[in-house]
Image (cartoon, rainbow, N blue to C red):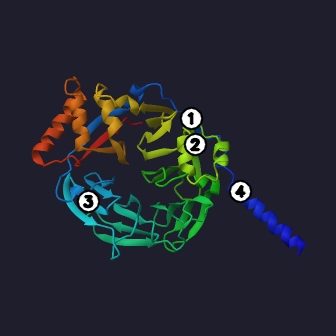
Amino acid sequence: MERIIKTFLLLIFIVSCKNNEFFSPVIDDTCNVVSINTNNDSAYFNCITDITFIPLEVNEKSIYLNNPVMLNPNDSTIVLIDKSNGMMLGYVNCKNRFGRRYIGRGRGELIEFGNAFVYNDLIGIYDCSTARCLYYNTDGDYVKQIVLEDRYCDEFYQKSNDYSVGFSLSREFGNGDYFCNVYNNTSGKIIHSELFLSRLHSEIVSHPYPVSTHNGKISFYIPYGYVIFEMDSTCNDVFQKYYLDFNDKLEKSLVKNKLNSSNLFAEVLSSGASGNLTDFYETNRYYSFSTIYERTRYKVLIDKKQNQSYAFDTSHGRKKNDLFINQLFMTIRPIGSCNNDVYMYCDYKSFCSIEDNCSMASDSLKDSLIKQIQKYREEYTLDDATKLFFKISFLEF
């Protein structure tokens, strides 16, 4: 009996130690190390080849676009899914093709938005409340669903006809151990898991996670782990692609000292440490994301061809006399990517403020966008909250 008690206590000690370890992967020889360079805004903008306005039709359903994500099932189709109020709008050649509510308890409806993606021209929306992924065609019609038997998933992405990938840290749903789980689409069961995260590290990771799908690949980043990972085509393994070398990385001792804090995530953010990424997207050549670096917010590009980084300091767009492009990129927010483009948006009121600030400046980009939006004003009635959408095209390989 004494031996059993000692063994039990030893197991508790091992689990306790494991749950207080900080995720810090050993960097592979094949992983590219990229230093985060914040010295030159122009290097960021030199990666952009074009900025165009997308004149999506405005109608009575447009008022429901408060917090959208954008998907591109094909070259002529855009689907906007609002994460806040359950509206999905589809456009073909910028004209509204359908609008439907996807939140509810009926057939083809879900309870809580987790994430959205495109697979084989279908729109997948994952319900993180019921562990189901519902699929719709480009007319907005419900087609099918995948039901997960193992409910360890906050976000879900279909990778192939047979397998999908889920990401989770939720206490109520998750196993609390592995960030990345591979599912069998037929059974809905987890077939293997990758990347153990202790309870300590999971306290400083927030949803939505930095995950991007691009040309059949899934890339993701664990906040404060400093590595961009990629899932292989068979879902059998994950690979380290880039190690992001920030100067002011998070001190592990800070997290351990604040472990009993009621809001450890807020404590970490207030420390000024770099390593949390948001608005994470991928193009053919770049990873694009936003981050706080040395207590300043940057929009950052990781060049996969040159293994370099380029960053725009958003504080350089806050003053009325700042350059038009600086004010624009301080304001617009990424909501999707496809091929070589990242899609961003802002509300009409914010754009008008930039337009007024730069009214006397000579700027070809400003003149081009204002001309496009003036035509849009003539066609549709816009109010302050109307969303304006932009396509940002980047350099190819």
Q: Which residue is mark 4?
A: 18
Asked if the residue under mark 4 is in contact with the one under mark 3, i.e. CB atoms within 8 Å, the reply is: no
Secondary structure at badge 4 equals helix
Q: Residues within 10 Å of mark 1 (few under 14, many from 20)?
A: some
Circle 2: residue type: Tyr
- Figure check: 195 above or below 9: above
Is there CB contact under 8 Å for labels 2 and 4?
no
Label 2 or label 4, whichever comes before in sequence order: 4
User: Residue drawn 19% across and 30% down?
Assistant: 367
Could you tell me how far apart the alpha carbons at marks 4 and 1 are, in whole angstroms? 26 Å
Residue 317 lies in quadrant: top left
Dot 2 lies on which element?
loop
The residue depicted at 50 percent of the width and 29 percent of the height is 37
Horizontally, is 352 left or right of 12 in the view?
left
Q: Nearer the viewer, mark 2 or mark 4?
A: 4
Q: Which residue is mark 1?
A: 246
Name the image quarter holding the N terminus: bottom right
- Residue 250, quarter of picture: top right
Left-right relation of 158 to 173: left
- Tag shown at residue 226: 2
Residues at discs 2 and 1 in contact (Cβ within 8 Å): yes
- The picture places residue 289, in percent across and down from the top left corner, at 44, 42
* Nearest to N terminus: mark 3 or mark 2: 3
Q: Is mark 1 in CB contact (under 8 Å) with mark 3?
A: no
Mark 3 lies on residue: 89
Q: Nearer the viewer, residue 149 or 272?
A: 272
Q: CA distance from mark 3 to mark 4?
A: 45 Å
Amino acid type shown at disc 4: Lys
Measured Cα–Cα span from mark 3 to mark 2:
36 Å
N-term mark: 4 or 1? 4
